[in-house]
Amino acid sequence: MQILVVEDDQALAEGLCTALRRQNYAVNSVSSGRDALHVIRAETPDIAILDLGLPDMDGIDVLKQARSQHPALQILVLTARSHIEQKIIGLDSGADDYLAKPFEIPELLARLRVLERRLGTAKATQIIVGEVKLDTSNNSVVLGDNELELSRREFMLLRSLMENVGRVQTRNTLETRLYSWGEEVASNALEVHIHNLRKKLGSDFIKTVRGVGYRVNQQ
């Protein structure tokens, strides 16, 4: 899952990015409204965490433009503007959720999980496909009665596939959800992760759709 953090407070932005990466998200960060709109146009994330108090333009204007450009983008507004009237303006301008500062990271993560469920076919934190159970609340995967040990990116990849069970995920989509800006990606990295997952889950769990990408089917 690719998240864009739009926050001009460098310390807060770095803290958010660190906390989100620990939860197996691919995270990028910008500090201005114009940069945010450029990224959303060029490389649309799955979710944007948007601070309204930006240095170059009002966050509500960023919100409206982002929403008009990409109606499906999930946007969580993060701001010190906590009065009910301001919340209503934010929600009416296109925000999917609104979290006032100061906030606790566990609440932010819970709200992100809700937004994620809107993007995929999964409707709960526990996703079950056949004998495989993936829990997004504690980053665990169980096959039958055995908990599996997965690397961070193996978990991210499996999560993306299982959250979209029955849907083909292209190679580009999966790579975008696995890596943040500046991370070096080997040409065969995705195939290596798929190979490792198949060894742990069984060779038939992840299907290859030739020339397109990969899919997990409901069982």
Image: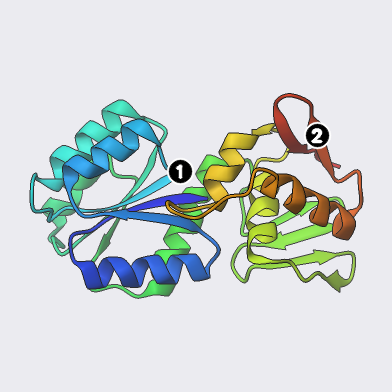
The answer to whether residue 158 is left or right of residue 39 is: right
Residue 189 picture location, percent across and down? 68, 49
Amino acid type, residue under disc 1 in the picture:
Asp
Mark 1 burial class by Cα count in 10 Å: few <14, some 14-19, many 20+: some
Residue 46 tag number: 1
Work out whether 20 lies above or below 179: below
Q: How far is the residue under mark 2 from the one under mark 1?
A: 23 Å
The answer to whether residue 48 is left or right of residue 141 is: left
Q: Quick one: SS at disc 2?
A: strand
Residue receiving disc 2 = 208
Q: In this rendering, does residue 193 appear at all?
A: yes
Q: In which quarter of the image is residue 95?
A: top left
The answer to whether residue 199 is left or right of residue 125 is: right
Residue 199 picture location, percent across and down? 89, 57
Mark 2 burial class by Cα count in 10 Å: few <14, some 14-19, many 20+: some
Residue 196 picture location, percent across and down? 81, 56
Q: Quick one: SS at disc 1?
A: loop
Residue 15 picture location, percent across and down? 33, 73
Q: Is tag 2's residue or tag 1's residue first in the polypeptide sequence? A: 1
The answer to whether residue 107 is left or right of residue 68 is: right
Amino acid type, residue under disc 2 in the picture:
Thr
Q: Which residue lies furthest to the top in this view?
A: 211
Q: Which residue is drawn at 31% across and 69% down?
A: 14
Q: Which of 140 and 188 is in front in this view?
A: 188
Q: Residue at x 90, y 64 (%)?
A: 144
Viewer-side label of 2, 1 = 2
Q: Which of 57 and 77 is in front in this view?
A: 57
